[in-house]
Structure formats: C-alpha cells, structure tokens
Image (cartoon, helix red, strand yellow):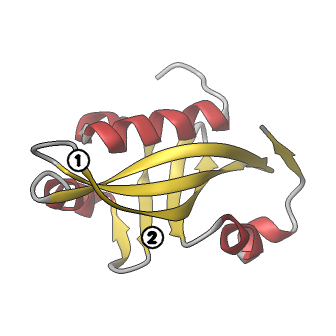
C-alpha cells in the first residue's frame, strides 16, 4: 500500500465503507482493527464482513463528510449519517455524526462513531491532541 496521510487514509476508509468494499477496508486496517459503534459496541476485524452485509439490504448507513479535524496521529470526520434504501437510494433518515479514525503504522487502527463532533472532540483520545481543521 502506498504511503498516505492520516486524512487520506480516513477519506479512503469512508469511501470504502460507503461502497461496501470489504477488501479495501481490510487493506486499510491494522490486524487488530476496531470499529466502535454506538449500538453494537466494539467490532473486530473479523466482524467487519458481517457488519457490511447488514448494511447491504433494507436501509444502510452512508457517511456524508462535511468537515475534517486532524489531531496528532488521527482524524475526525464531522458530517452526517444517512440511512438510504439500498435498492432505491432514497434517503429515509439522517442524523449528525462524527467518526474518529485512529492511525498506527500507516493504517487505520480504530474507527469510532460518535453522535456529534463535540462528543468526538471531548473523548479522552482527542481532547488533549494538537489540532488542524479543514
């Protein structure tokens, strides 16, 4: 895998999640990758396929980035989560969301879904890290 900045890795991860591309997600992820959701708790690398499969029928979640915050070694995406009908693409609901991406060794080590940018920034991992926003 080519060398990418933390933001490029986070953007690629969002693209792969929205496209439901399992292989692309696993290529970006560390061996001990964690996905921390608000409703299912912590999922490991081996759980990602099932999580993506559940997103492929009925209504699936899609991430819509609006702002990026880079913190020492990680990135936060602020925007919204849309629940779209996977057959028609019709948006059936949306909510503010923030996704934090922890990086290690040029890969994504942790993705955590937060209810808001404020909640993501207040989490202990991010609160004391130097920032730059774009």
Q: Which residue is mark 1?
A: 90
Counting from the top left corner in percent of width and height, residue 88 is at 13, 43
Residue at the spot 26% in from the left edge and 36% down from the top edge: 23
- Side (left or right) of 40 relative to 8: left
Q: Is residue 28 visible?
A: no
Residue at the spot 52% in from the left edge and 19% down from the top edge: 2
Q: Is residue 21 visible?
A: yes
- The label on residue 36 is 2
Q: Quadrant of the C terminus?
A: top right
Counting from the top left corner in percent of width and height, residue 86 is at 15, 48
Secondary structure state at the residue bearing disc 2: strand
Q: Nearer the viewer, residue 62 or 73?
A: 62
Residue at the spot 59% in from the left edge and 30% down from the top edge: 8
Q: Name the image quarter holding residue 53.
A: bottom left
Q: Nearer the viewer, residue 93 or 22?
A: 93
- Cα separation between marks 2 and 1: 26 Å
Question: Circle 1: is it few (<14), some (14-19), or many (20+) Cα within 10 Å?
Answer: few
Q: Nearer the viewer, residue 50 or 107?
A: 50
Question: Circle 2: is it few (<14), some (14-19), or many (20+) Cα within 10 Å?
Answer: some
Residue at the spot 25% in from the left edge and 37% down from the top edge: 21
> Disc 2, disc 1: CB below 8 Å?
no
Counting from the top left corner in percent of width and height, residue 11 is at 53, 35
Q: Name the image quarter holding residue 22.
A: top left
Counting from the top left corner in percent of width and height, residue 4 is at 61, 26
Secondary structure state at the residue bearing disc 1: loop
Q: Examine the rendered structure and indicate whether residue 128 appears above or below residue 132.
A: below
């Amino acid at each position: 895998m080519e060398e990418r900045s933390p933001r490029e890795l986070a953007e690629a991860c969002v693209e792969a999640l929205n496209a439901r591309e399992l292989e692309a997600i696993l290529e970006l992820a560390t061996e001990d990758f964690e996905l921390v959701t608000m409703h299912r708790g912590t999922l490991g690398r081996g759980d990602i396929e099932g999580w993506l499969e559940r997103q492929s029928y009925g209504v699936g979640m899609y991430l819509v980035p609006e702002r990026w915050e880079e913190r020492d070694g990680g990135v936060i995406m602020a925007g919204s989560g849309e629940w779209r009908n996977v057959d028609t693409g019709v948006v059936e609901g949306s909510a503010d969301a923030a996704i934090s991406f922890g990086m290690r060794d040029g890969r994504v080590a942790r993705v955590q879904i937060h209810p808001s940018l404020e909640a993501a920034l207040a989490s202990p991992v991010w609160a004391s890290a130097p920032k730059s926003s774009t």
